[in-house]
Image (cartoon, coloured by chain):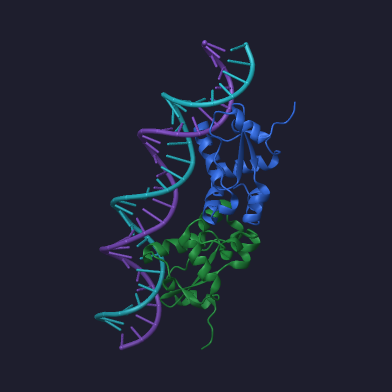
Chain colours: A green, B blue, C purple, D cyan
DNA sequence: TCCATTGTTCGCCCAATGGCGAACACTCTA
DNA sequence: TAGAGTGTTCGCCATTGGGCGAACAATGGA
């Protein structure tokens, strides 16, 4: 089973691929608002624990419906925190850890450290 | 003009002093939400440029009424970012820079750096 | 003792946000 | 080609948050 490049994936798909925002184009306000939500922080933490492209959208343990979940993923994409790739009917996720860290040094660490329950 | 201690101020005042929250008791969510607002970020930046106890509440250049401004100051107090002291009819302000930095390393720097307009 | 100054509180409005179910679109397999 | 699985979009609703003016409270000076 040879690994497919993102280009191959996009070519084979009739689906519009997810729209991403580069962390460098994200304002501090957008970043803070994205991370201010507890569900999204939970998603970010789960993503950080897993490897890149390991987790599918439906496989997260959050107490919301898939409609709400889909919206949260969109917010994470727009804030430069999340990259997504289509793989068949599923959508794989990757936390843009290094890029986001370069844009907002220390911010992601505060969320991942989670020395409190918030 | 001898400097008055906070104790002397409080003793001479019939006013209930402002309620403060220690940064150590502040959740990450509260901190992020406090700094997610552009008016409050502007206040924090002005406070950082000025010296401790230098600025009075009314002396900030923000496009809101004093009612709204008062609410913003309350939020900053509750998030451990602001300390206030009564001085006559005025209220003096101090950014709790070191304490907040110890609680949320790097977060305040992101706001003060303001390498973008947000 | 009045009154201008300073700041808070209250009630109200409006916009933004998060939540949901239902419907839709796409992919892959049977 | 039918259907199961996955995820997005579309209303809709409830809550939250920021904004305002008006009224109130406290201080200090005239």
Residue drawn where x is 59% and y is 49% of the image: B22
Query: Which quarter of the figure has residue B9?
Result: top right
Is A106 in front, or is B18? Answer: B18
As drawn, A48 above or below A106: below
* Side of A116 where C29 appears, left or right: left
Q: Position of residue B75 (x, y in %)?
A: 53, 43
Residue located farthest toward the right when viewing the structure as drawn: B1
Is D18 in front, or is D25? Answer: D25
As drawn, A49 above or below A20: below
Residue drawn where x is 37% and y is 63% of the image: A67
Q: Position of residue A83 (x, y in %)?
A: 53, 68
As drawn, A64 above or below B39: below
As drawn, A33 above or below B56: below
Residue drawn where x is 54% and y is 83% of the image: A3
In which quadrant is the N terminus of chain B drawn? top right
Q: Position of residue B19 (x, y in %)?
A: 54, 41
Q: Position of residue B45 (x, y in %)?
A: 65, 43
Count of all numbered marks drawn on residues in the image: 0
Residue B3 visible somewhere in the drawing: yes
Residue B91 visible somewhere in the drawing: no
Residue drawn where x is 57% and y is 63% of the image: A115
* Side of C28 where B77 appears, left or right: right
* Side of A79 where D16 appears, left or right: left
Query: Which quarter of the figure has residue B104?
Result: bottom right
């Amino acid at each position: 089973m040879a690994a497919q490049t993102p280009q191959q994936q996009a070519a084979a798909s009739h689906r519009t691929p997810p729209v991403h925002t580069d962390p460098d184009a994200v304002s501090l306000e957008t970043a803070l608002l994205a991370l201010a939500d507890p569900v999204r922080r939970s998603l970010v933490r789960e993503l950080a624990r897993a490897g890149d492209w390991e987790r599918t959208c439906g496989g997260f343990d959050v107490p919301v419906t898939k409609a709400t979940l889909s919206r949260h993923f969109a917010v994470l994409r727009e804030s430069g925190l999340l990259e997504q790739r289509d793989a068949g009917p599923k959508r794989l996720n990757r936390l843009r850890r290094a890029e986001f860290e370069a844009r907002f040094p220390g911010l992601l660490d505060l969320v991942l450290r989670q020395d409190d329950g918030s």
